[in-house]
Amino acid sequence: MQDTEQIEISLTQSAATAFKTIVDDREYDNAALKVSVAPGGCGGWEYQLGIARQPTDTDLVTKSRGISLYVDRETLPMFNGAIIDFKDGLMGKGFAVSNPKSKADCACGQSFKMTEGSVDSGSCTSKVAGN
């Protein structure tokens, strides 16, 4: 669903290249990156990233670096302004999100808090963080 609401979610070049490689390897046509958050993770909220072929009724549609993004309208206020990156390092590889709306982030880039205080040290279960 197209919408005029201001969506400020962006991909780094690394994330756009990784997403394109994934969908090309799987031979998906018209694939978009679905972006939302859900309760969970070591910070209380975790990012949900996936492949979608069409938006749902609650999605806002935008593009970044040539990749279509289907962004959940309900949770957008929790991460609008976020930058999605792809990291490939010694501790693993995967997508990570930098969110200006979070109050504290897990080192893995997959989980965040919306309230003051730190994320519990050692509680991360993300494969990106090497756990």
Image (tube, helix red, strand yellow):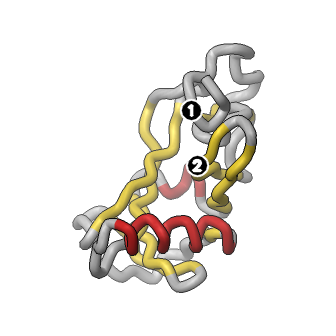
Looking at the image, which is closer to me, 63 or 15? Answer: 15
Spatial CA distance of label 1 from label 2 is 8 Å
Q: Position of residue 116 (x, y in %)?
A: 74, 27
Of callouts 1 and 2, the N-terminal one? 2
SS for callout 1:
loop
Q: Quadrant of the N terminus?
A: bottom left
Q: Quadrant of the C terminus?
A: top right
Residue at coordinates 40% horizontally, 76% vertically from top-left? 61
Q: Which mark is residue 127?
A: 1
Looking at the image, which is closer to me, 20 or 102? Answer: 20
Q: Which mark is residue 97?
A: none
Relative horizontal placement of residue 10, taking residue 60 as reference (left or right): right
Looking at the image, which is closer to me, 86 or 46? Answer: 86
Q: Position of residue 88 (x, y in %)?
A: 68, 51
Above or below 112: residue 22: below
SS for callout 2:
strand
Mark 2 is surrounded, within 10 Å at the Cα level, by few (under 14), some (14 to 19) or many (20 or more) other residues, namely: some
**Amino acid identity at mark 1:** Lys
**Amino acid identity at mark 2:** Gly
Above or below 72: residue 25: below
Mark 1 is surrounded, within 10 Å at the Cα level, by few (under 14), some (14 to 19) or many (20 or more) other residues, namely: few
Asked if residue 15 can be seen in this view, the reply is: yes
Kindly identify which residue carries mark 2.
94
**Contact, CB < 8 Å: mark 1 with mark 2?**
yes
